[in-house]
């Protein structure tokens, strides 16, 4: 096995690489999304302010879609920007993709990503319009509300009691080059949100829950970007930006307690967690069943599950843990059995000794 | 819930970022302009422009407090003049860089201590800080950046805030700004690019900041129901230890940290504190005095232990010194008495590790306290180290 250092490029090289790629990126098509947790957080202002600043720097910027309802602050920003007017189809405003492609600006602003188009348009959804424009080499800056993300819809509906029908798939977000969360305290927008009903306290609580969801969703998108970045450069770092928990399942360990603890801890940290088993050659069918049941339980609780092959338990677990940037390993320790052998130490002792940069949580049984 | 200052005191709002140049100060000033328009009496208590034109423009029309000039070792340094601000007594005071360490002679050691004074006197404070200054993630930041951040902010100060707002910008935008010279002058920019401003570092720090803000938002959801007061603390308060335990807090996690004079103590304490904050556990720490280095401890050893105890106390962990010749038994007894659920230990050093099974602390604690989980914390390394 290569040592970690062999795989780690030196900083100067990395820096050059980053800068080169950045220069290339300036020409590449880009999708940038401003994500907010409710209407009124100021996504449109942030977006159009960026458009204004880009224009000042000499970039060719047009506006392809604006929200119908907007105040004086937006008007002021819009007045300095070129508009490619929307088309009216069946009484609804639709992004004029054809006109934008013909105009071919460097940057196009499209507000309200989640809108659906009426029948008869090029695409059923506005996000597909955006996809086409980005593919044509035009940078698109757009905005989206949390409640319109398909996979978040149920959770948001449970909070707000409002049903939305127009949605954007999460995969579209994951595919974006940049995502920015527009975070403001709920008090700055409650005046507007009160319209949606409930006492001020209820509204504040609801907005706060939505806010947390938006921050965590953005963190997930960013985490994927980090993974992709490290992978693309072959950087093998075992640190991560979030907690990751691994439960070592064995037939003997009180896996139920470990799994419950891991699940609870993972929920507290909004962390990913995993359960892994290192296959033993001489395992009885009964033990096999026990392990399977534990892994199924973990899977049902939201864990990623892995069956590992390897001669040595400790090495196999740690190699997997490092590759998955694990920060906490949960392991069982039998007080009766010889797991902790007398002098040299059994697997748990060896695991503790070798688990660099990770915490080991020992569950006695 | 500790409600030490319910009703009294100013309201603290923190603009949290993940790097210089994300726009924390800019956003704070933008909001302050809005507040001033609606008639709030705003004073800029301390403001760091870094020569950024856009940011300076946003101070227009806002009153700035004079700075205090302090001579130290032949240089003249400028610090926030807390006493002048108190005399002026604005409704709202803006204070940049909460984690800043004052120059000796400034009165208080840390700017956050000055901020606490302003709050105590009923002044609302808006302030800025980067996530890497948070004490509890110091080791994680070290792993990500290779930089040991020295100016740290105890997490409980952040928890005093009524609001924590994330100021977000993408790493790409930051790198562009850096290259255009918006954030730093060119020579400094080159240095910045080499540690905190590597893209992978920025992406990772950004994720940390997003998760931290989400956590702060969540804490306030849980407690706002009970507290209902805008100026209240959101700290996971640890009740003082009694002798023998009451029946309160059944089913709650209770974490015990075993303190030693080992160099990895700050890491161990931070990890345990962080765990306690997230799982809403109570957090205690004990040092077992057993005179194993020959009767009375050597003075430097004592000083080291005192430093460790202070470090824990500064993070609002209740500490105890136990006298016992048998560390494992003392820990186990204490844990049983106080219904501890997890004991945090530093990973033993290789040399002390094997040989006599009777001296193996982990193994002995497992034996003495067979229903308590043990967490062994290993040191964190620099990237590439």
Image (cartoon, coloured by chain):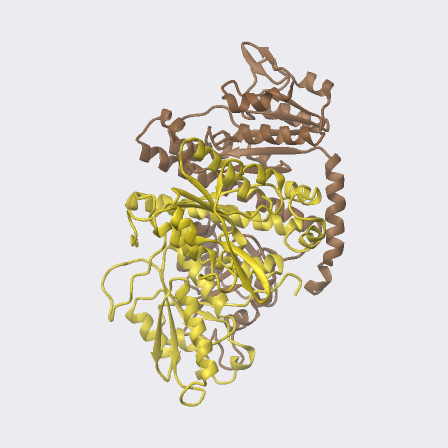
Chain colours: A brown, B yellow
- Front position in the image: B58 or A147: B58
Q: Is residue A178 above or below residue A262?
A: above
Residue A241 image offset from top left, x and y in percent: 56, 52
Place residue B93 in its image quadrant. Answer: top left
Where residue B247 appears, as percent x and y from the top left, is 23, 62
Position of B78 relative to B355 (above/below) = above
Residue B249 appears in view: yes
Quarter of the figure that contains the C terminus of chain A: bottom left
Count every numbered label the image shows and give the total: 0
| Picture coordinates of residue A249, whole percent (x, y) | 48, 60
User: Residue B361: percent from the left, percent from the top?
Assistant: 44, 78
Looking at this view, name the residue that lies furthest to the top: A90
The residue drawn where x is 59% and y is 62% is: B75
- Of A225 and B212, nearer the camera is B212
The quadrant of the rendering that contains the N terminus of chain A is bottom right
> In which quadrant of the rendered view does residue B293 lie?
bottom left
């Amino acid at each position: 096995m290569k040592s970690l250092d062999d795989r780690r490029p030196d900083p100067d090289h990395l820096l050059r690489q980053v800068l080169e790629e950045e220069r290339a990126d300036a020409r590449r098509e880009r999708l940038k999304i401003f994500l907010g947790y409710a209407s009124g957080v100021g996504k449109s202002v942030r977006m159009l302010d960026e458009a204004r600043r880009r224009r000042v720097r000499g970039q060719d910027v047009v506006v392809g879609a604006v929200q119908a309802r907007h105040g004086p602050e937006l008007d002021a920003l819009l007045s300095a920007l070129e508009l490619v007017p929307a088309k009216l189809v069946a009484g609804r405003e639709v992004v004029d993709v054809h006109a934008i492609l013909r105009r071919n600006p460097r940057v196009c602003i499209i507000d309200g990503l989640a809108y659906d188009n009426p029948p008869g348009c090029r695409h059923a959804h506005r996000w597909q319009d955006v996809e086409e424009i980005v593919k044509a080499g035009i940078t698109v800056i757009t905005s989206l509300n949390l409640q319109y993300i398909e996979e978040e819809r149920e959770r948001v509906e449970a909070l707000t009691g409002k049903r939305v029908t127009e949605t954007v798939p999460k995969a579209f977000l994951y595919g974006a080059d940049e995502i920015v969360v527009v975070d403001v305290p709920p008090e700055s927008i409650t005046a507007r949100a009160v319209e949606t009903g409930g006492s001020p306290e209820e509204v504040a609580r609801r907005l706060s829950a939505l806010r947390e969801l938006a921050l965590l969703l953005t963190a997930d998108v960013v985490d994927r970007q980090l993974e992709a970045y490290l992978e693309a450069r072959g950087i093998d770092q075992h640190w991560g930006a979030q907690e990751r928990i691994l439960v070592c399942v064995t037939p003997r360990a009180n896996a139920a307690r470990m799994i419950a603890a891991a699940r609870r801890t993972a929920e507290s940290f909004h962390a990913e967690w995993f359960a892994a088993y290192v296959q033993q050659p001489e395992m009885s069918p009964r033990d096999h069943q026990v392990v399977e049941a534990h892994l199924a339980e973990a899977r049902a609780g939201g864990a990623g599950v892995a069956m590992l092959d390897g001669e040595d338990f400790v090495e196999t677990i740690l190699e997997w843990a490092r590759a998955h940037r694990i920060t906490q390993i949960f392991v069982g320790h039998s007080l009766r059995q010889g797991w902790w052998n007398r002098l040299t130490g059994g697997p748990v002792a060896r695991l503790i000794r070798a688990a660099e940069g990770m915490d080991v949580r020992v569950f006695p049984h | 819930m500790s409600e030490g200052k319910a009703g009294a005191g100013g309201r603290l709002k923190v603009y949290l970022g993940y790097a210089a140049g994300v726009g924390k100060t800019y956003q704070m000033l933008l909001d302050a302009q809005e507040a001033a328009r609606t008639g709030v009496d705003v004073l800029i208590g301390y403001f760091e422009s870094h020569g950024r034109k856009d940011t300076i423009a946003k101070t227009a029309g806002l009153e700035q407090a004079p700075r205090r000039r302090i001579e130290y070792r032949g240089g003249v340094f400028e610090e926030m003049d807390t006493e002048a601000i108190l005399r002026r007594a604005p409704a709202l005071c803006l204070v940049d860089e909460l984690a800043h360490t004052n120059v000796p002679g400034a009165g208080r050691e840390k700017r956050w201590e000055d901020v606490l004074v302003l709050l105590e006197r009923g002044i609302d404070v808006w302030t800025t800080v980067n996530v890497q200054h948070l004490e509890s993630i110091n080791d994680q930041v070290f792993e990500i950046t290779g930089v040991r951040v020295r100016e740290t902010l105890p997490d409980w100060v952040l928890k005093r805030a009524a609001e924590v707002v994330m100021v977000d910008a993408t790493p790409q935008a930051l790198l562009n700004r850096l290259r255009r010279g918006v954030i730093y002058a060119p020579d400094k920019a080159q240095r910045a690019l080499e540690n905190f401003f590597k893209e992978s570092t920025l992406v990772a720090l950004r994720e940390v900041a997003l998760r931290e803000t989400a956590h702060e938002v969540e804490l306030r959801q849980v407690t706002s129901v009970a507290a209902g007061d805008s100026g209240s603390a959101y700290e996971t308060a640890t009740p003082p230890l009694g002798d023998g335990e009451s029946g309160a807090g059944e089913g709650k996690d209770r974490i015990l940290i075993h303190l030693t004079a080992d160099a990895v103590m700050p890491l161990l304490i931070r990890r345990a504190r962080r765990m306690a904050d997230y799982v809403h556990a109570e957090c205690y720490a004990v040092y077992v005095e057993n005179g194993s280095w020959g009767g009375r401890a050597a003075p430097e050893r004592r000083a080291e232990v005192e430093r460790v105890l202070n470090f824990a106390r500064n993070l609002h962990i209740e500490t105890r010194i136990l006298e016992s010749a048998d560390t494992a038994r003392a820990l186990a007894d204490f844990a049983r008495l106080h219904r501890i659920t997890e004991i945090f230990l530093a990973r033993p050093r290789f040399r002390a590790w094997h040989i006599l099974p009777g001296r193996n602390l982990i193994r002995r604690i497992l034996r003495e306290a067979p229903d308590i989980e043990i967490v062994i914390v290993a040191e964190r390394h620099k990237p590439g180290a």
